[in-house]
Image (cartoon, helix red, strand yellow):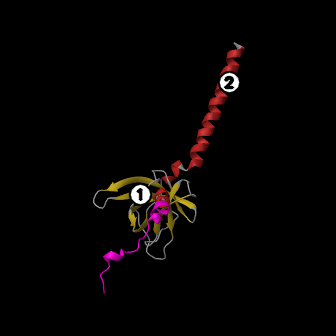
């Protein structure tokens, strides 16, 4: 009987510690911080590597989260929806670009400040965007694209004076 009480107490302590760990992980991960902000949309030609939950950063500081992604079937552009921290006010001429943390790091949306006095309202759109750069395509072009040789014109094809 005494052994059962000790096992029950140890089990309760383990469950309590697990609950505290999950509560800590939830509060520090930023999962619940998307509420209370305002929504902004942006269209990109390529959003490779960006998923719902990806960071939106300005000057390297997280100011929001990607909350939705869909395809605009009229323009064939990818439309991302961001939830932006309500304390951060974005000017209407900000630029948004898909970038990564280093060569092979995770991708995020970087917002560059604008100079306009007019602010983007809730549900507004960022018009100046730059999509993700396909690094492997660039490497392939550097390796194989520069291998194209220019040949001199055939002397027989040149008309005589």
**Residue 133 shows in the view:** no
Q: Name the residue under label 1.
A: 81
State the image coordinates of residue 144 (x, y, percent, origin top left): 46, 60
* Helix, strand or loop for disc 2: helix
Judge whether 7 appears above or below 34 on screen.
Answer: above
Please tell me whether mark 2 or mark 1 is closer to you in this view: 1
State the extent of the magenta-drawn residues as a range.
141-161
| In the image, residue 56 lies in the stretch drawn in magenta | no
**Residue 137 shows in the view:** yes
Question: What residue occupies the far top of the structure in this picture?
Answer: 1
Can you say which quadrant of the picture contains the C terminus?
Answer: bottom left
Q: Residue 72 carries which label?
A: none
- Judge by depth and name the residue closer to the eye, 91 or 121: 91
In space, the residues marked 2 and 1 are separated at their CA atoms by 48 Å
Judge whether 161 appears above or below 44 on screen.
Answer: below
- Judge by depth and name the residue closer to the eye, 139 or 64: 139
State the image coordinates of residue 41 (x, y, percent, origin top left): 40, 61
Position of residue 90 in the picture relative to residue 17 (left or right): left
Q: Mark 2 or mark 1, which has the lower sequence index?
A: 2
The residue drawn where x is 56% and y is 57% is 103
The residue drawn where x is 68% and y is 18% is 5
* Helix, strand or loop for disc 1: strand
Q: Mark 2 points at which residue?
A: 9
The answer to which quarter of the image holds residue 159 is bottom left
The answer to which quarter of the image holds residue 102 is bottom right
State the image coordinates of residue 25 (x, y, percent, origin top left): 59, 43
Query: Dot 1: within a 10 Å radius of its alpha carbon, few (fewer than 14), some, or many (20 or more) residues?
Result: many
State the image coordinates of residue 51 (x, y, percent, origin top left): 45, 51
């Amino acid at each position: 009987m005494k052994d059962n009480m000790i096992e029950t107490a140890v089990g309760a302590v383990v469950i309590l510690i697990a609950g505290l760990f999950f509560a800590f992980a939830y509060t520090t991960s930023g999962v619940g911080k998307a509420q209370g902000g305002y929504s902004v949309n942006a269209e990109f030609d390529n959003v490779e590597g960006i998923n719902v939950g990806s960071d939106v950063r300005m000057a390297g500081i997280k100011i929001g989260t990607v909350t939705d992604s869909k395809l605009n079937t009229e323009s064939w552009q990818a439309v991302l929806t961001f939830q932006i921290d309500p304390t951060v006010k974005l000017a209407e001429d900000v630029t948004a670009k898909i970038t990564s943390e280093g060569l092979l790091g995770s991708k995020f949306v970087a917002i560059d400040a604008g100079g306009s006095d007019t602010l983007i309202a809730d549900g507004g759109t960022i018009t100046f965007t730059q999509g993700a750069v396909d690094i492997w395509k660039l490497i392939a072009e550097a390796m194989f694209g520069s291998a194209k040789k220019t040949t001199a014109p055939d002397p027989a094809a040149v008309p005589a004076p």
